[in-house]
Amino acid sequence: MSSLDWLVLFGTLGAIVAYGVWKTRHANDMASYLHGGYADRWYTIGLSVMATQASAITFLSTPGQAYVDGMRFLQFYFGLPLAMVALSIAFIPRFYGLHVFTAYEFLEARFDRKTRQLAAFLFLVQRGLSAGITIYAPAIVLSRVLGWSLNWTCVSIGALVILYTVTGGTRAVSQTQKHQMVVMLGGMVVAFFVVVMRLPPGLSFGRAVGVAGVLGKMNVVDFSLGLDSRYTFWSGMTGGFFLALSYFGTDQSQVQRYLSGKSITHSRLGLLFNGLLKIPMQFLILFVGVMVFVFHQFNPSPLFFNDATVTAVRQSSAAGQWQALEGRQQAAFASKQQAIEGWQAALDRHDEPAVQASASRLRAAEAETQKVRDDARHLIHRVLPRAETNDTDYIFIGFVMANLPRGLVGLLLAVILCAAMSSTASELTALGGTSVVDFYKRSFRPGASDRHYMVVAKLLTAGWGVLAVLFAAFASMLDNLIQAVNILGSLFYGAILGLFLVAFFVKRVRATPVFVAALLAEVLVIAAWLTTSIGFLWFNVIGCALVLGLSLALDALLPRRGPA
Amino acid sequence: MPVDREPPSGGAAGEGGDELHAAPPFLTWRAIYFIVLGALALQVILYAALTAAYR
């Protein structure tokens, strides 16, 4: 990296963090620390909600996922706007009505303490684990760029986030997220224009998208039915809706973002702002990945995008086999070049049969490329059994490092780090806040001073940060990172959402039936995940439906005390 | 011994009166929800067309 890149990277990060800490230096009570003194306007809430969800994983994994799998991941977000409307109508007024610090307090008002603490516990487990992955993802990038050890990189990122989160609390998080989100969106727009400008001069933008379409990358919407298909319109609208409803409605890292609004109107508008912008933003990020794919149809790509692994294989006894695979890849690349030239010439002549014939040749050459990549992965696994054979997360950063001009590399690294810091900061304040409000204050030390709780919240926030860093050390064993986070969320969110839906809409159900139903539902969901091939998005629906059904059944079966 | 609490007779949604339901000055809530959901429908149509065009 050039010195200009370093200047852009540290200048951007330093300025944003310093501004956030300076702006929020007077956070000295629980309301200020956990909800920023209820001062945020709707656009700050909207950007903060988006920045919380958009972790570094979003910017590392998503373009790589589009490169490999096309645009279909976009459907995952189709249920989100619907969920934002549902939250504005049904959730926010209830939270505001009880003036809660955490979403889980509502469950005690409706049921009892054990139900509140079950939901809070499920949140702490899944969000605590996710926070580790959120730190791990950008650590891969920095360790690659700086040549640091992965574990020390995790520690450095974690320490920086803990510092400004503990210093300024929620307000510091919101204030920094507003600027971080501008950097993230700006950086991706710049990346998009750079990749498009790097395409061959004779290739129009429409033809570039056409190449992606021929090779199956423009598969944005899939209306096919089938529970085992991971991303379809139907799974996005239903599973995605339930996941968004659970995540934004019951995950404290998001609930505290919109409860910090100046008024209920600002909170609602902030969420609806997210509902309007989220899908176009994800489209942009995925489309950048597709354009990187098109770029590599005209410029040779590495056989495997993780340089460190490639170097290790080249230094092993399988170096000759690796070279042979690279030869096959070059031959497939040459076939693609010929097929694309033929395809373009046929389009110019309006010769439809020739267009189809060239497209078939192009697909065959791409299938050969994929076969070579599969063989390369098998070879890596054979030679280096402990090495990660999924290189999706390295695709976009590899393109950035090799092809972006000086200064922009620093900007794109700032995008990734801003994303990591913004989502981790939200997670840590939520974990610390929930630990204090739902457990420490409720069960261990009621009646202490406000200042005491704020100090404990800061200590627990730092403690969760340390745990997240420790967990990050194990995250390298997981497959694609963004999917790991989403799978983890889907296993827990359904049951938590079920608890809230019963609380809101099924007035006859009592506390013990819903508590037992949530425990049973969680066990059944995890068992189904381990033993079936159901797409993970469906577990949001299944978990929620199980809690609803089981709580109704148990409420009918369990005897009531006194007159009904 | 914790005793199951019977659900409250009213919902929290109704508490707080007008402030909880106050719309922003420029549009009604219903119109804002319509805009958000309309934008979603428009995008799905657009993306379906994009998928069909570049199949």
Image: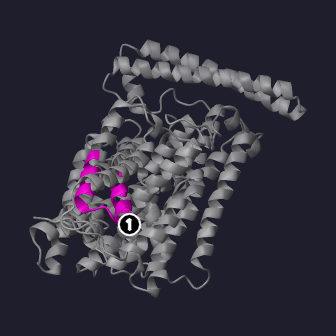
Q: Position of residue A86 (x, y in %)?
A: 49, 65
If the image is split into quadrants, where does the C terminus of chain A sit? bottom left
Q: Quadrant of residue A200?
A: top right
Q: Position of residue A137 (x, y in %)?
A: 37, 46
- Please report, as a chain letter, where disc 1 is located: A
Crowd class of label 1 (few under 14; some 14 to 19; many from 20; radius 10 Å) = some
Q: Does residue A375 sit above or below A158 in this rendering?
A: above
Q: Residue at x 47, y 87 (%)?
A: B18
Question: Dot 1 corresponds to which residue?
Answer: A504
SS for dot 1:
helix
Image position, residue A69 (x, y; %): 55, 36
Q: Is residue A498 magenta?
A: yes
Q: Which residues are magenta?
A: A495-520
Residue depicted at 44% across the width and 65% down the height: A49
Q: Residue furthest front?
A: A563
Using the image as rendered, state which of residue A110 and residue A387 is in the foreground: A110
The answer to whether residue A427 is seen in the rendering is yes
